[in-house]
Image (spheres, helix red, strand yellow):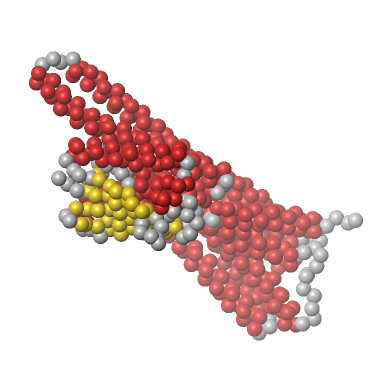
Amino acid sequence: MEFHLQDFLWFISFATVFILSLYSLIVAVRTRLKAFYWYFVFSFSLLIYLQFRSVYGNILITDNQFFLNFNHVIYWFIQVIYNCAYAIFFIHLLGVKKHLPKFEKQLKISISSIFVLSSIVALTAVIIADGILFRHYFQYVFSPLISIIGFIILYKIWEIPGKLKIFFFVGGLSYLVLVLFALITSLFDILGDFVTPMSIFYLGVILEQICMGFALGYFIEQLNNRYRDTLRQNLNLKNAHNKDLNLKLQQQSKRLNKMSAINKEQTVALLKSNYESKLNESRLSSLQSKMNPHFIFNALNSIKVYLIENDKRKAITYMNRFSKLLRKILESSRVEHISLREELEISKLYIEIENTRFNDNITFQLDVLVHDKMLNLSLPSLILQPFLENAFWHGLAPSKREKKLSIKVFEINNYIQLEIEDNGVGLTYNSATKLNNKIKKKSMGIQLTKERLEVYNQKYKTAYDFKISSKTLPENGTIVSLFFKEI
């Protein structure tokens, strides 16, 4: 059998384009990144063009002049599609909008204008049944324009930081030079029978696909590294903060031991006063520290589940929200109290995170019906979290119907009242069906909150309290009412 270089390179081109087309589609669906969608458009359009050049012959066999002319226009127009898609893919893959915003805007306008012009010429060629018109347009108008844009892109690419541009530059340059060479040699017929213009074109496609394969692999590796670094930084931040708290506690203990050795009455009286104050602070910190690790462990465990399930998109969304919430929790732990406004912001973040674990099936509503100044009211941090956790896991989780959760803040009798309402299974269901250990765990969170409020009331002369009640039948659910009164 006689060996034909053009046919051999066609098979290699078709195989590599098919594999990368399928690969880019899978990655695009999994990551929702626009760069991979555009590369799929490029590679799939190129695959259609290669089918037109199939060694098995044209798939369209007809004597109808209209369809023959239409087929001829599509043959050239499909090349317009994959060349334009390749330029848009470059914009998204290398983050041109971030590093070169002005160039990104100009490039989008140029590509859009060329594509619209090509579409108009193609439609005109179909209507007047003149396929030669669009072929001449492609060879003498579109090809020079897109080549100029291509060389400009390869020049500007070096202003973008990172190593990813190297793969794109090598692949793009190889493809652009070889395709231009193939086009020029086809117009002037200066090659022999063994090395044809299409052989040069297929070689450019193969080199580009190889470089893009490496580029896409490198891009995904960098993406995974960023995810791991973000998680590692959050964990390091938590460990550093815990270490700092332990050091301060040791220093405070040493100071208290030195002061306790002084026997003078005035010093003893002052020590007693300071001790009571520090004791209240210590109790508040101790009670709060019992709340934080439980929630942090659940959040980290959810991230681990998403990573195990390879659901990177949910893991990233969850991790971003969790890191923001963790930062707010760490900031609030450095002070004895925070404002109601900050507490509501933390609670909203917490609800978004927990709702992610429920696949966003819970409808949440926040109604603040007080003046903005009243939101400056001070209260212990994370005081709402135990009630919200109970609403999620002991009220809404067992429910089989549409799940709703709301927080309402309003003024009554010159004090602020806050209500947390859910339409879950209610207190009766929990007391009748839950296991003893789960009931104890739930009660422990409420008991800790009650103790925190008692210590806070004693120190700051407030009358903060709460009440938990079931909704009136026939409605199901629980209402938690918190009363923020000042003496």
Query: Residue 180: image x %, image y %?
Result: 65, 61
Instruction: Classify residue 242 as left or right of residue 152.
Output: left
| Quarter in which the C terminus is drawn | top left
Query: Residue 225: image x %, image y %?
Result: 52, 41
Query: Residue 49: image x %, image y %?
Result: 70, 65
Depth check, front residue: 179 or 297: 297
Depicted 442 relative to depicted 107: above or below:
above
Residue 254 in view here = yes
Depicted 300 relative to depicted 355: above or below:
above
Depicted 75 relative to depicted 356: above or below:
below
In the image, what residue occupies the spot 68% across and 83% down? 129
Instruction: Classify residue 486 as left or right of residue 229.
Output: left
In the image, what residue occupies the spot 41% across and 44% down? 323
In the image, what residue occupies the spot 40% across and 36% down? 293
Query: Residue 21: image x %, image y %?
Result: 66, 57
In the image, what residue occupies the spot 56% across and 62% down? 148
Residue 317 in view here = no
Instruction: Classify residue 133 as left or right of residue 310.
Output: right
Depth check, front residue: 87 or 194: 87
Depth check, front residue: 80 or 325: 325
Instruction: Locate residue 246: give its quadrant.
Output: top left
| Quarter in which the N terminus is drawn | bottom right
Depth check, front residue: 375 or 122: 375
Instruction: Locate residue 403: give its quadrant.
Output: bottom left
